Amino acid sequence: MEFNGTHDFKADRKKVYAAFLNADVLKEAIPGCTQAKWGNPETLEVVVDVNFLVLKGTYVGYFQITEQQEPSHFKMSVNRGSIQASASIDLADAGGKTTVSYNAEATLAGPLKVADNIAGKQAAKSMLESFFKSVEKQIS
């Protein structure tokens, strides 16, 4: 499953970049997230309650920051059981705003494999938009 797109934020790049790495902002922005905390500077632990299609339950994920060029770029990955995913996020100034571009790829297995279809991809895109809107609301 691949995702890519952009989102414009009405905030400067440094503020948006900092928000993407702020555990409190992420906890509020990630749909279903009940906990987000940094275990070390490169590892974010999140606990998410999922009620998505036929998937229900509480899941723990560890996101690794694998590359960082503050405040314009970072890469992250998660490799946990049924999911292997990575994302590249780029931030660019856009006339007083910030444009965030993302490219992500996920391989789903086991019970998560059921979401690897058009409906699952549309639902994931919807959750991404919800995530971006929540981050924007928090930094406005």
Image: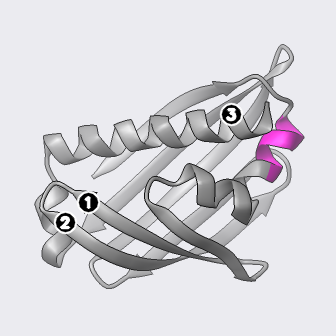
Q: Which residue is mark 2?
A: 55
User: Which stretch is magenta?
Assistant: 13-18
SS type, badge 1: strand
Q: Amino acid at mark 1?
A: Asn
The image shows residue 114 at horizontal and vertical percentages of 11, 62
Give the residue pinned by disc 3.
Answer: 136
Residue type, label 2: Leu
Proximity of marks 3 and 1: CB atoms separated by less than 8 Å: no
Kindly identify which residue carries mark 1: 51
In front of the other: 118 or 49: 49
- In the image, which is nearer the foreground, mark 3 or mark 1? 1
Q: Main secondary structure of the magenta part?
A: helix
**Secondary structure beneath label 3:** helix
- Residue 98 left/right relative to 112: right
Dot 3 amino acid type:
Glu
Name the quarter where the C terminus is drawn. Answer: top right
What is the C-alpha distance between the residues marked 3 and 1?
24 Å
CA separation in Å, label 2 and label 1: 6 Å
Callout 1: few (<14), some (14-19), or many (20+) C-alpha neighbours within 10 Å? few
Whether residue 17 appears in magenta in the rendering, the answer is yes
